[in-house]
Image (spheres, grey):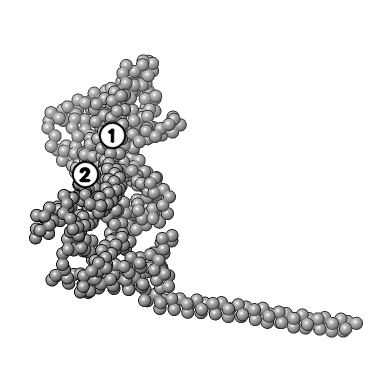
Amino acid sequence: MEDVSKFKLTVSRMFEKASQIKLDEERSARVAELVDSEVMVLNASQLAQSQQRKAYQLTISIHSTFRHWWDFIITASIAYVIVTIPIKVGFDVQSLGLNYVLDVVVDVIYLIEMVLNFFTSYEDDATGEEIKDLDKVRLNYVKSWFLVDAVSSFPSSLVGTTNGLLTLSKILKVTRVAKVSDSGLVRTVSGHIDRSMNPSMLRMLKLTVIFLVSQHLIACTYYYISLNQSVETTWAPTHEIRSSDSLGQQYVDAFYFAIMVTTANDVNPTTPIEKLFTSVMLFVGIVINASIIGSAANLLANLDKEEIARKNQMDSINDYLRFKKVPLNLQNKIRRYYDYALTTRLQDPTETLFADLPDRLKLLLKLNLHSEFVRKVPLFRALSHSGVVAIIQCLAPVVAMPGEIIIVCGEVASEFYFIKTGQVSLCVPGLVNSIPLGNLGEGSFFGETSLLTGEPTTAEVKAERMCELMYLDKDDFEAIVDRFPTFFLAVRRISESRMQTAQNIQKMSKMNRRPTQILKIKKISFRSVAQAAVLKARFGDRLETLTSKGASGRSEGRVGSIVGGGRRLMSTGRRKPISSFSVNFIERLSLAQARHLTRLRGMRHMQSNAEEDIFWD
């Protein structure tokens, strides 16, 4: 029995193995079939693309250099036609010499243009895609401009005889002016001008050209009608004008009539053709006045839209300041800031105006807006591209008014500044006179020493004139220093060099002091120490606790601050109210301190030691 069962098991395994092999073969066959079909599809696609590329070789791209130059030639020929053909037809001027040669050249250009249009690609209005398929190109051309080109491409200059049909064919050449706006070159140039100048100015220019062309056509038509009338009337030019050999005199008279008739002046038509023409021209004049002149009034109003908006905002600010009776000195400072801010557009538009812009375009825009600033800062040369981008993304703008203190001597700096425009001065405040350390201009930076050492600043930084600054807060500065060692090394070396220079200047200043100044400093120092001793004896540990929070690292010039703080402490202990409140202490705040107080919305947001740092006298 065991042998039989083993035999059955062996047979079943053989059948299972055979069936599995069959399944694998079927699966392999299906896979091979799918691969073959994919290969065939791929080959067909590649063949189609290859054939398409060969077909596209016959297509002229609308963006090609050749097409742009050809569009320039076509635009110049249309301008020539729109000026000369109405004059030749209206004033019965014959083409001789150079004029005849130019007419022949224009006719040949029109014929070549008609052929080239069957091979020139076009842009789909819906998708903006450039269509190069010749079948689609030809169909699109036949549906759009083929009829206009066909009626205006008749080589009238090559036909010797003159008759009504020939005159009509010349007039039909003027219809090509409708194609000027559709020219790729004209659209490119218009777009560039629209981006580089006020759009209202460009529209005004277009309206002016349309107005002059319409008056030119009316003048030539008027003279053509007057020449072909058998009756001489007061409506037509005088006999002296008609018999004159001066084409300029005849044209000026006709152009004057065009202006008169389109502005609804009485021109005394007598014959039916004169009345019909005058009526039509009056209607045309109404359209011109309603559309062109009416639009021109709106465009002139919007020609300096930015200046109007700025003036309206400044008027609102001035009205509010006057209504609230703000001191004149403060009003002048506020007006000066807004004059600068509205003129230079300080606000970064990438987060508001271009909020929905894709990230890549937004980053490109921001870097382009700051490209000149990056070139001004030598420190950026120590950074890679990623480092420059990181700093630009973290920078925030701030404006310092002339004479405004940016960094107060003795405070622990919390911001690192770059100078975008303007100039700042550095000095060490003294008990008698300040010691100037020098000036910093565009592309320089400051505030790095305190951020690197964690110690209070030893110099005061003040704006000499209107300054536009870019700053990094402490957290961003520390992160960038950690991430980019070359930036840290460059900043540290420059900081050490500045500290050494400042020490040398201070030593030289001490050596150059007069004896009277030294005696005065000793008296002030002795008086300050004596006052501090009296306060310590009176308040003991309470005064030490108060002053120890902010006294470390402060310069000798802050002794008076401790005394002032103690006096306020005594006043508070006696619970005496403040006799008068003054906002002058704001002038002595640094930019960082002023920004912190401006953003304060509750005592829970007050930084530690903020009161001590800000309210010392």
Residue at mark 2: 265
Residue at horizontal 43 percent and vertical 61 percent from the top: 127
Sort mark 1 into few (<14), some (14-19) or many (20+) by Cα contacts within 10 Å. some
Up the image or down, 423 lies above or below 331; here it is below
Side of 332 where 519 appears, left or right: left
Kind of residue at badge 2: Asn
Residue 393 image point, x, y percent: 37, 50
Side of 550 where 250 appears, left or right: left
Tell me the element at label 2.
Answer: loop
Residue 599 image point, x, y percent: 39, 34
Residue at mark 1: 314
Res. 582 visible in picture = yes
Q: Nearer the viewer, residue 329 or 89?
A: 89
> Outermost residue, right direction?
1
Res. 64 visible in picture = no
Q: Nearer the viewer, residue 237 or 374?
A: 237
Mark number for residue 258? none
Residue at horizontal 22 percent and vertical 74 percent from the top: 158
Up the image or down, 407 lies above or below 522; here it is below
Residue at horizontal 16 percent and vertical 37 percent from the top: 510
Q: Nearer the viewer, residue 294 or 120?
A: 294
Quadrant in which the N terminus is drawn: bottom right
